[in-house]
Image (tube, rainbow, N blue to C red):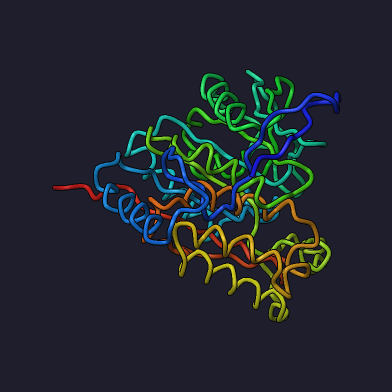
Amino acid sequence: MWTTVPKGKDMNRGSRFRMEDPMAIPARDIDRDPGASLATLQHWNNDIRGTRSLNMTLTPVHFFSHGSTMMLGEESTSADYWKQCGDEALRNGIKGVIMMGAHWDCFGDQIQVSTNPNPGKSPVAYVHPSKYVDYKLNPDLKTAKRCIDLLDEAGYNVSGNDTFDWIHDTYLILIRMFPDGCPPSTIVSMNARYDPHFHMKVGSTLRQLRKENYLIIGTGGAVHNLYRNRWAPMLRFRDNFAQDSPPEHWALEFRQAVEDVFTKTSGPQLRRAMTRLMKHPEYRDAHATDDHFMAAMFVAGAAGDFEDEGTPAILATETWELTNMCNSQFTIGSWPAVVA
């Protein structure tokens, strides 16, 4: 289906934007007859699966729940896993990191890519400045331009932002993954309408960069509702991990649903299941606002092609904070096994 999307403030200008069913975004360009028979489509799918082994190796994709700001200052199994993933990425010689976080969005139909050559860092609460102030960010302006071009070609109203300062949702992860130095990194914004299919297609548009050894990361939250957290232990004792009572049922239910989607689906089914989570009965309790779940849509787009069918995903670890915040860490795919 083709839809006209207004560009910028001039509502009379438009771009041709192809909004497809996220499960049907093809792994390669192909002319598809709307009246094609089921047998024809099945043959096409089988052909894609059969050529998977001929394609270049795809880098894994991570969905990281960054949690509260104190995840930067306190040690946890999640922090250990982030470091492990960073070490693996460096061993495999990544060209750079491409991230969508949960704290930067754009109005209207816009998305932006950070092109600030020397970004600052937004300060974070409850974390000593020594944990982050001196860490040197490494914006990848060349890859930012590449992302802008790819998204523009896909019909997005996209532009660079050369004044954006990075926020803890992204640099917290980079510091934990790469404590000895930030690799070339590109930050892509969300759109403030929080359309799951819109963000999924951002991921599918940039998915091809996995074949060029870029690491794609979405950093948001599996269960992230600041209004339902219990803040007293952190405010009184600076203890974000205190669990003086179990998590509430809605948090446990939605946390399980997220795990099931990541670990029991793959390919286009992953895309369908991820968008369907926003209709889960406990979704609004788990996410009072949609911003921390758009990174999951971005990840499903980047790792939910027909070519990704059968790719295993793992829940590597999780950290509960503030009683009801579940920071689950997922990875889809893996690096090639090292032959001794």
Residue 69 percent coordinates (x, y): 70, 50
Q: Quadrant of residue 144?
A: top right
> Horizontally, is 230 left or right of 177 in the view?
right
Is the residue 288 above or below the residue 18 in the image? below
Is the residue 101 above or below the residue 160 in the image? below
Indicate the quadrant containing the N terminus: top left, top right, bottom left or bottom right. Answer: top right
Residue placed furthest toward the left? 340
> Which sits in the foreground, 103 or 19?
19
Residue 20 percent coordinates (x, y): 60, 47
Q: Quadrant of residue 188?
A: top right
> Which sits in the foreground, 302 or 15?
15
User: Residue at point 60% right, 25% down?
Assistant: 148
> Which sits in the foreground, 39 or 243?
39
> Which sits in the foreground, 241 or 264?
264
Q: How many marks?
A: 0
Residue 45 percent coordinates (x, y): 37, 55
Q: Quadrant of residue 12?
A: top right
User: Residue at point 51% right, 61% down?
Assistant: 270
Residue 210 percent coordinates (x, y): 42, 39
